C-alpha cells in the first residue's frame, strides 16, 4: 500500500461522517429502578488530572442515552472512524519513514588547500589527450570522405 492510497482512504473515512475528537470514549452507567436495569451512555473526554490510583479522569462532554438512541449509535460510528483514521495515519507515518529516511546531519568538509602546480598536472594531461583525439577524428573524417568518393565512382553500386 502506498502513501497516496492511505491518504485517499483517510479522506474517504473523513467524508463518510463525523469523526470523534481525540481522547474521548464512551462510558456506561447502570441504574437500577423498580428492579429493572437501565444502561445509559455518555461521551467522556480525558482531563489532565489523574486519580490517586493512576487512572485517567474523564469529563462528560455529551449525554448519549441508551443503546437504541440515535446519538449513541452515531457516536460509536464516529469513534470507530477516528480509530481507523489513527491506524491509517500510523501506517502512513511508518511508510514515509521507510520511503524518506531522516537525513544524517551534514558533516563539515575540511577546506582544501589552494591549487598548486601539482594539481594542474592532470588537467594538462587531459588537454593533451583531447588534442590527440581531435587529430585522430580529423584523420578518420578524411578517410571516410575518400571512401565515399571512391564508392560514388564504383560501377557495382546501383
Image (tube, rainbow, N blue to C red):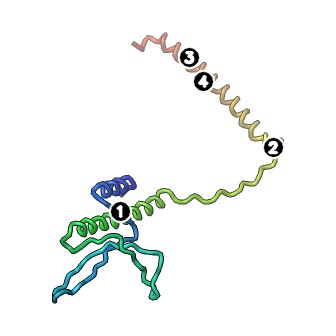
**Which class describes the residues within 10 Å of circle 4: few (<14), some (14-19), or many (20+)?**
few
Residue 84: x percent and y percent? 33, 65
Disc number lying in front (2 or 4): 2
Q: CA distance from mark 2 to mark 3?
A: 45 Å
| Residue identifier under label 1 | 85
Q: Which residue is mark 4?
A: 140
Q: CA distance from mark 2 to mark 4?
A: 38 Å
Is 34 positioned to the left or the right of 93 in the image?
left
User: Given contact means CB atoms under 8 Å apart, are the residues at marks 4 and 3 in contact?
Assistant: no
Tell me the SS state at disc 3. helix
- Residue 122 vs 61, above or below: the answer is above
Task: Identify the mark nearer the N-term, 2 or 4.
Answer: 2
Front position among marks 2 and 3: 2
Viewer-nearest of discs 4 and 1: 1
Q: Quarter holding the C terminus?
A: top left
Of tags 3 and 1, the one toward the viewer is: 1
Q: Quadrant of the N terminus?
A: bottom left
Q: Are there few (<14), some (14-19), or many (20+) residues within 10 Å of tag 2?
A: few
Secondary structure of the residue carrying numbered label 1: helix
Numbered disc 2: secondary structure? loop
Q: CA distance from mark 4 to mark 1?
A: 69 Å
List the residue tagged with mark 2: 115
Q: Which residue corresponds to mark 3?
A: 145
Which numbered disc flags the more N-terminal residue, 4 or 3? 4
Amino acid at each position: 500500500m502506498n502513501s497516496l492510497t492511505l491518504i485517499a482512504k483517510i479522506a474517504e473515512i473523513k467524508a463518510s461522517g463525523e469523526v470523534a475528537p481525540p481522547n474521548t470514549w464512551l462510558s456506561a452507567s447502570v441504574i437500577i429502578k423498580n428492579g429493572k436495569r437501565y444502561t445509559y451512555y455518555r461521551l467522556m473526554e480525558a482531563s489532565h488530572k489523574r486519580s490517586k490510583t493512576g487512572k485517567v479522569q474523564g469529563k462528560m462532554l455529551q449525554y448519549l442515552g441508551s443503546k437504541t438512541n440515535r446519538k449513541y449509535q452515531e457516536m460509536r460510528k464516529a469513534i470507530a472512524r477516528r480509530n481507523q483514521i489513527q491506524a491509517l495515519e500510523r501506517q502512513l507515518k511508518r511508510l514515509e519513514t521507510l520511503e524518506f529516511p531522516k537525513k544524517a546531519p551534514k558533516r563539515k568538509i575540511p577546506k582544501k588547500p589552494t591549487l598548486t602546480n601539482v594539481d594542474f598536472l592532470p588537467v594538462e594531461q587531459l588537454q593533451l589527450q583531447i588534442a590527440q583525439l581531435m587529430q585522430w577524428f580529423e584523420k578518420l573524417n578524411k578517410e571516410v570522405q575518400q571512401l565515399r568518393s571512391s564508392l560514388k565512382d564504383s560501377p557495382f553500386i546501383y
